[in-house]
C-alpha cells in the first residue's frame, strides 16, 4: 500500500447539510425533549453517514486501477467508448444512499479532457443512464500512455455532480476528485488489454479496492 488517503472524515460537501438538520435537532431537544427531537436526530444520523469520507489505503502495485467509488458492481462488459471512440472494457459501480459518495481517481496521470453532459435522471442502475443521464467524464492518461475514462453519472435523486479537476491537471491514483450527492453511478472505460479484477455483484471500496490491472 502507498500513502494513506486523508481527507476530512465528514466531507466538506456535507457540512451545510449536516448543520441544517443538526441545529434544529439540538434546539428541539433543548426546548421540548428527546421524544419530539427523535425524527430530527434520525435525519441527522442519515445525513452524517451519507457524507462520511473515511481514510483509505491506496494500493501501490504498478498498473493497478483502483475503484473510483464505493458501491456494487452492476456492469462488466465490452462496449464502444463514447468518449475516446474505441472499443473498451467497461465497469460500472452503483452507489446507493448508504455508500460513501466521494469519488477517487482510478489511476495517476494527467487529465487530458473533460466532458459534461446535461441530461435526465433515470435510475442510475439502468444501462440507459450511462447515455441519457446528467454525467461528467474525465479522460486520464497514465505515464505509460494508458487511456482511462471515468464518468460520474447522476441518478434518480442525485441532482448535483461535483468535479474538482480540469484538463492539464496532474492527478494521483486514489486522489479525491469529486462527489455526487444522494445516489448515483460511476463508469470506468478501460483498454481492451486491461484485466478486470471484479465481477458482477461485488461490493467495492473507492481508492482501496482494485478494479483492474493495466498491461503494457
Image: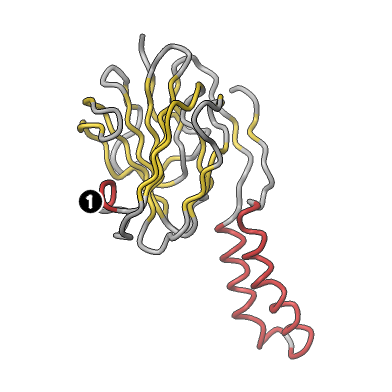
Whole-percent x, y for residue 11 in the image = 63, 51
Q: Give the residue number, with chain letter if any, for mark 1.
A: 128
Q: Nearer the viewer, residue 79 or 113?
A: 113
Question: Which residue is found at the position 66% from the left and 88% from the top?
Answer: 36
Quadrant where the C terminus is found in the figure: top left
Whole-percent x, y for residue 65 in the image = 43, 25
Q: Nearer the viewer, residue 67 or 181?
A: 181
Question: Which residue is found at the position 32% from the left and 20% from the top?
Answer: 194
Question: Which residue is found at the position 36% from the left and 34% from the top?
Answer: 188
Judged left or right of residue 124, residue 57 is right
Judged left or right of residue 134, residue 39 is right
Q: Residues within 10 Å of mark 1 (few under 14, many from 20)?
A: few
Above-or-below relation of 200 to 1: below
Q: Nearer the viewer, residue 44 or 88?
A: 88
Question: Which residue is found at the position 65% from the left and 25% from the top?
Answer: 3
Q: Secondary structure at mark 1?
A: loop
Whole-percent x, y for residue 20 in the image = 65, 71
Above-or-below relation of 30 to 8: below
How many numbered discs sit on the rendered protein? Answer: 1
Judged left or right of residue 16, residue 93 is left
Judged left or right of residue 132, residue 93 is right
Residue positioned most to the bottom: 32
Whole-percent x, y for residue 112 in the image = 44, 26
Amino acid at each position: 500500500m502507498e500513502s494513506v488517503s486523508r481527507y476530512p472524515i465528514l466531507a466538506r460537501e456535507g457540512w451545510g447539510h449536516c448543520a441544517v438538520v443538526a441545529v434544529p435537532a439540538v434546539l428541539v431537544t433543548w426546548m421540548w425533549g428527546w421524544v419530539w427531537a427523535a425524527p430530527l436526530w434520525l435525519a441527522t444520523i442519515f445525513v452524517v453517514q451519507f457524507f462520511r469520507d473515511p481514510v483509505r489505503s491506496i494500493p501501490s502495485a504498478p498498473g493497478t486501477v483502483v475503484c473510483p467509488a464505493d458501491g456494487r458492481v452492476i456492469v462488466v462488459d465490452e462496449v464502444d467508448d463514447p468518449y475516446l471512440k474505441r472499443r473498451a472494457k467497461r465497469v460500472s459501480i452503483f452507489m446507493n444512499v448508504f455508500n460513501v459518495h466521494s469519488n477517487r481517481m482510478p489511476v495517476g496521470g494527467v487529465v487530458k479532457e473533460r466532458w459534461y453532459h446535461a441530461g435526465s435522471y433515470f435510475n442510475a442502475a439502468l444501462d440507459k443512464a450511462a447515455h441519457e443521464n446528467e454525467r461528467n467524464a474525465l479522460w486520464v492518461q497514465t505515464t505509460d500512455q494508458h487511456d482511462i475514462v471515468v464518468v460520474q453519472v447522476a441518478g434518480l435523486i442525485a441532482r448535483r455532480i461535483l468535479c474538482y479537476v480540469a484538463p492539464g491537471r496532474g492527478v494521483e491514483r486514489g486522489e479525491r476528485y469529486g462527489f455526487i450527492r444522494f445516489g448515483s453511478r460511476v463508469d470506468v472505460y478501460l483498454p481492451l488489454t486491461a484485466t478486470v479484477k471484479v465481477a458482477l455483484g461485488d461490493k467495492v471500496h473507492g481508492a482501496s479496492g482494485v478494479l483492474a490491472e493495466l498491461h503494457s
